[in-house]
Image: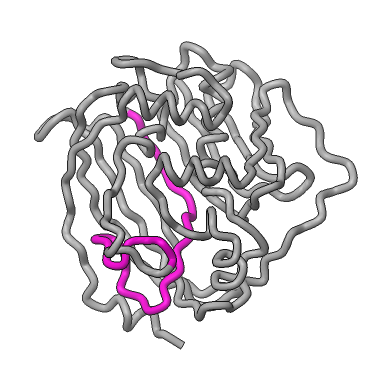
Amino acid sequence: MTDLEDAIRGWAPEPVTTTGTTTPWAVAAASGLFDLEPVAGEGDDLPPLWHWFGFLEQPRSDELAEDGHIEDGHFLPPLPQRRRMFAGGRLRVARPMRVGEALSRTSTLVDARVKHGRSGEMLLVTVRDEFRAGPGGDVAVTEDSDLVYRSQAPGQARGIGFDTPAAAAPATSSEAVTLHPDETLLFRVSALTYNSHRIHYDHPYATGVEGYPGLVVHGPLLALMLLEIPRRHRAGRTVTGFDYRLTRPAFAGTPLVADHDGGAGTDELVVTAGAVGLPPSVTGTITLE
């Protein structure tokens, strides 16, 4: 078994600054994932985290590893038989990004620590992205992303199965957001985010190599479901903060629901999303002003 502490000793990637924009085309395409007409146009406020459809890595095919991820990314830890899971993050918004706005993004490694869980050693990596309207400008948006890595032999089961939903599904609010993630939807999300991780579209790989019981719903898609609640039902209010944690995978073919436990006038929404009748796949808190 690989000692993760030894594997990352001396690993300290420097900050990287890139530029990018989220175009009206990308917003229109992402809107279609939720069966919506374009939710914003050129110059409008970009919904929180929709920059995920604009600031994309562009690796060559010969730079990819067998799992579909880039083999030697700047913030990818040097682990053998590396497996990657998106674990959550935190978002702080000083002012919304705008559709079509050119921004610089400075990415920094802020934490890398080994933890021990029921499934063994894992490495928790946190990368911070700061978005500015040009060099030296004020930070508009700060995003921390938590990624979990582990060394896992091909074909090793993860101990995850398809759970049986509760006989009586819990009641939902009138503001609940529903989604039916089939194979086509997962393929479209992968395409729009240039994410070639095979667990989202290659069933034999997801089950036979990474040990999942089916195709895995993208963690970022679950987070975006949570943010659809205030976008659809809190017109005129701005998301200034979003903390979220992914707790269990969701799989293709299982209907998903995002909901909250607060009233229409609250400044803070406690939100969850996941398969109906099962514990949530993601939990979070959204702060509004």
Q: Nearer the viewer, residue 113 or 104?
A: 104
Magenta region: which residues?
67-93
Q: Report the residue at 31% width, 67% height from top.
A: 71
Q: Is residue 222 above or below residue 239?
A: below
Q: Report the residue at 28% width, 56% height from top.
A: 110
Q: Nearer the viewer, residue 165 or 201?
A: 201
Q: Report the residue at 18% width, 54% height from top.
A: 15
The quadrant where residue 95 appears: top left
Q: Nearer the viewer, residue 24 or 276?
A: 24
The quadrant where residue 162 appears: bottom right
Q: Is residue 59 left or right of residue 168?
A: left
Q: Is residue 250 left or right of residue 116?
A: right
Q: Nearer the viewer, residue 44 or 200?
A: 200
Question: Residue 50, how many percent across, how many down?
Answer: 40, 32
Q: Is residue 198 left or right of residue 62?
A: right
Q: Is residue 274 above or below residue 98?
A: below
Q: How many marks overall?
A: 0
Q: Is residue 161 above or below residue 43?
A: below
89 within the magenta span: yes
